[in-house]
Amino acid sequence: MKSTKPLISIILPVHNASEHLNECLSSLLNQSYKNIEILAIDDFSKDNSYKILREFKKKDNRIRVFKNVKRYGIGVTLNRLVRHAKGSYIAFMDTDDVSSPNRIKKQYNFLLHNQDVVAVGSQCTFIDESGKKIGRSDFPNENYEIYQNPLHGISMQFETVLINKGKLPKDVLRFETDGHPFVYSDLLIKLTPYGNLANLSEFLHYHRNNPSVYFSDLKRNLISYIKLWIKSRANYDYQASMKSFFTPLIKTA
């Protein structure tokens, strides 16, 4: 029987990801929300990533696999994936990560009952290469706090986000392709005119990264960060003050 629940597309860019790809894909296929498609593009990997994707595809037709003919980078690959997505909702995933079985179900139910929200993330448990827990997120839950500095890894973890595509004009879900270091934050700010942002208080995702890296990236790319704030004010009517936008830097100064 065909599911009456809306299709959710899970976006998975892949590059040299063979070490953790099996665990990542298994966590997505084991989601309690079953009406999903997993869209994966191998961005010209030099390891066995593409082979792993093909093997999983043979076992489950919910996986759709593509391959770039050369290395295009994250922005182009994400845009290609979004264009292929058929779902009414779009989720994102990192090949190093693991999602808990109820992640998609709980986020979908939240969006269904909170029609003012355009995108919802969740809390993260941070893990190292071996899977050992090294920290936990403390992302704000409410739109006001997230809006002040909607930064990847500081106010939201982009790989946990589920977006209600029906609330957006067709051309909004587009990533910058110029190598901008804040490609995820740029997209989050683009969403703000069309609805609220939120995070669930539950820990529904394991992210293989050290949270201190995000603050280091901010300091290392300060000029790009300033340009992001200026661009957001000019192009997306972003109203947060410069002081609030730069709060993460001030706290770690």
Image (tube, rainbow, N blue to C red):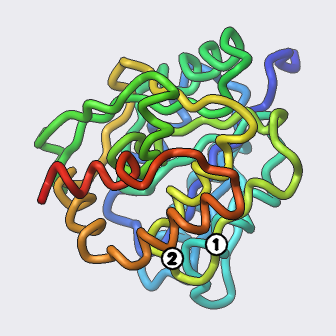
Callout 2 touching callout 1 (CB < 8 Å):
yes
| Residue 81 visible within the image | no
- Pointer 2 local density, CA inside 10 Å: few below 14, some 14–19, many at least 20: some
Identity of the residue drawn at 62% across and 29% down: 196
Identity of the residue drawn at 55% across and 71% down: 50
Counting from the top left corner in percent of width and height, residue 54 is at 61, 62
Determine the secondary structure under disc 2: loop
Q: Is residue 186 placed above or below 108 in the rendered structure?
A: below
Identity of the residue drawn at 60% across and 60% down: 232
Mark seen at residue 123: none
Q: Which residue is identified by label 2?
A: 180
Quadrant showing the N terminus: top right
- Pointer 1 local density, CA inside 10 Å: few below 14, some 14–19, many at least 20: some
| Residue 162 visible within the image | yes
Counting from the top left corner in percent of width and height, residue 164 is at 73, 33
Q: Nearer the viewer, residue 71 or 169?
A: 169
Determine the secondary structure under disc 1: loop
What kind of residue is marked 2? His
Mark seen at residue 176: 1
What kind of residue is marked 1? Glu
Counting from the top left corner in percent of width and height, residue 184 is at 52, 58
